[in-house]
Amino acid sequence: MSTEDVAMKLVELCKGKDWKKAIDDLYARDIVSIEPRAMENMPAEMRGIDQVRGKTDWWEKNMEVHDSKVSGPFVAGDTFVVRFDIDATDRNSKERMQMSEVGIYTVKDDKIAHERFLPLADG
């Protein structure tokens, strides 16, 4: 698959909130995933598909997503960017929040080998 093919498939799966299928189908076993900061017993940088699956399981367990918009992809060479706008409630604190971030992805051997998330600045 080309980078554009991988990017289009990721957007399609994320629009359907099928995060786990996206990981299973599109991510390299040795994926590196970098969040803007560490969270609740999770480091900012995770390595390997099992750690990324664990992060996704944590998200689904702890967050109730009311609405999400997925924009893109924006593609050049082996890299693509997707924007995520999410309205969610933390199941533990009951705090509702709106989040915007981009994911920057690198494709190698037809799989996502690296992802990094950058949040929208508060201004």
Image (tube, rainbow, N blue to C red):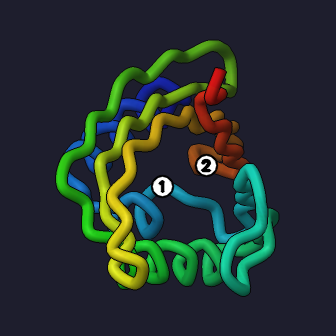
Nearer to the camera, 26 or 1: 26
Q: Which label belongs to residue 26?
A: 1
Label 1 vs 2, first from the N-terminus? 1
Task: Give the side of residue 31 with respect to residue 45, left or right.
Answer: left
**How many numbered marks are there?**
2
Task: Identify the residue shown where x is 34% and y is 37%.
Answer: 11
The amino acid type of the residue labelled 1 equals Leu
The amino acid type of the residue labelled 2 equals Ile
Q: Quadrant of residue 96?
A: bottom left
Q: Quadrant of the C terminus?
A: top right
Task: Give the side of residue 116 with respect to residue 70, left or right.
Answer: right
Q: Residues within 10 Å of mark 1 (few under 14, many from 20)?
A: some
Label 1 residue SS: helix
Q: What residue is pinned by disc 2?
A: 112
Q: Quadrant of residue 27?
A: bottom right
Q: Quadrant of residue 116?
A: top right
Nearer to the camera, 87 or 48: 87
Q: Measure how far apart labels 1 and 2 are at the Cα level.
A: 6 Å
Task: Give the side of residue 95 with respect to residue 109, left or right.
Answer: left
Task: Identify the residue shown where x is 44% and y is 73%.
Answer: 59
Up-down: is 51 above or below 26? below
Q: Residues within 10 Å of mark 2 (few under 14, many from 20)?
A: many
Measuring from the top left, give residue 41's x and y in whole percent. Answer: 72, 86
Task: Identify the residue shown where x is 33% and y is 74%.
Answer: 94
Measuring from the top left, give residue 65's x and y in whole percent. Answer: 25, 60
Q: Which label belongs to residue 76?
A: none
Nearer to the camera, 60 or 24: 60
Task: Identify the residue shown where x is 48% and y is 55%.
Answer: 26
Label 2 residue SS: strand
Measuring from the top left, give residue 42's x and y in whole percent. Answer: 72, 79
Asked if disc 1 and disc 2 are in contact, CB closer than 8 Å, the reply is yes
